[in-house]
Amino acid sequence: MNPSLAGTPPLGLYVHVPFCRRKCAYCDFYSVTHLERRGAYLKALSREIGLRQAPGRAVDTVFFGGGTPSLLTPRQVEAVLADLAGGFAMSPLAEITLEANPGTVDGRRLAGYRRAGVNRLSLGVQSFHDGRLAWLGRLHDRTQALAGVRAARAAGFHNLGLDLIYGLPGQGIDDWRADLDTALCLEPAHLSCYLLTYEDATPLGQARRAGRVRPLSDRAAAELFDFTHAYLESRGWPAYELSNFAARLEDRSRHNLKYWTLAPYLGLGPGAHSFEAPERWWNDACLEAYLEASRAGRLPAGGRETLAAGQQMLEAVFLGLRLSAGFDLAGFEARFGVAFATVFGTVAQALEGEGLLAAAGGRCCLTPRGRRYHDAVSARFAEVL
């Protein structure tokens, strides 16, 4: 190992696979439907790995996200992992996650991913209700979702996560509880439960602006959010982050925890973001631009910014408060050279008085009531700087 890297925290690697058979109406992540470009993308990805390689830098998580990473074959995923192992010091205990759509996998394909080295599967179920799946624009139905879980188990994926979406128009607690109960009966290791959002650039966001879709009221959405946390906790599934739940500490997403704790990560592929304090940079979110950069032998740079100390402190608060355990006050001071109370003491006391924040035992976190107001609480901290 390079002596200059001694004591450097291990990287997480994010690989963006920008292909979908069809774009879902709610999705704001960069993707294209030109599946014939997969070969060119993989060649460009290999070149980018070569340009960004750091042979002495430890890596302990890899996350294939998208898009639909399960549109890559197991052999293609294995080749990417081989490139990563050649460019970085990959831990033999690395968490290697692949997102998969139930409509794109079967038992043979999942077994191939497991043999290739993938040891954590995130299955994008979204719902077990056929009508809601159709409304979301998903390719699969309830039967395929259940079959996907069974196939993943048979393929050896014990670390299996299920992604669900709630807060759809007209959805009530009983309807959402049915989805949660089905998910829990399948005994996954992890649950991600995302409240539906209407991003401006998506077809769903456009339909909302045009009045073709009427979202749930803020009050109804908040009630579903509170129910999700209370119900899952009552079933032995406490939240460790605003949208993520695990019955056991060891089943939390180690890769995603890097984002919420400002740990370093490197993004590969079109539109992927990277961070290592105080720098953040990102690739061009265009497949053709990504391929052109590769042909020219250069990195697919989209942009870069250097975060000032105040920006870093705000992000540490904003992201740290997403975690149920919050963030460590002594760690904040060690990182920034100033006590949290010196910078944010006044607003923190006010938020405590309103029952939204708790600062005790050396940690700062949201209260159960404060969780539903995370963005508003974060905005209050931003007003200080």
Image: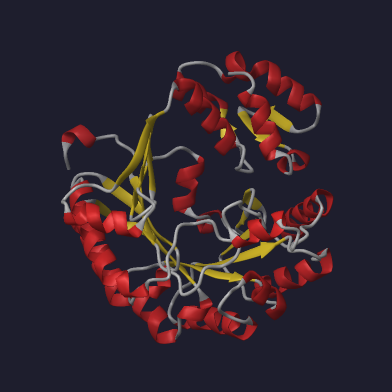
In the picture, residue 246 is in which quadrant? bottom right
Residue furthest to the front in view is 210
Q: Can residue 163 be seen in this view?
A: yes
Vertical position of residue 190 compared to residue 182: above or below = above
Question: Measured along the vertical axis of the image, is residue 264 above or below residue 141?
Answer: above
Q: In this view, does 349 lie above or below 262?
A: above
Q: Does residue 143 sit above or below 329 in this rendering?
A: below
Q: Which residue is drawn at 61% across and 52% down?
A: 199
User: For residue 16, which quarter of the picture?
Assistant: bottom left
Q: Which of 76 and 316 is in front in this view?
A: 76
Query: Which residue is more in the foreground, 226 or 136?
Result: 136
Report the quarter where the N terminus lies: top left
Q: Nearer the viewer, residue 319 or 213?
A: 213
Determine which quarter of the picture holds residue 86. Answer: bottom left
The residue positioned 64% from the left and 57% from the top of the image is 206
Q: Is residue 48 visible?
A: no
Q: Position of residue 222 (x, y in %)?
A: 78, 50
Q: Which colour scheme is used?
A: secondary structure
The picture places residue 341, in percent across and down from the top left corner, at: 61, 17
Q: x and y percent of residue 295 in the render?
A: 18, 57
Labels in figure, total: 0
Which residue is the extreme one toward the top? 342
* The C terminus: image quadrant: top right
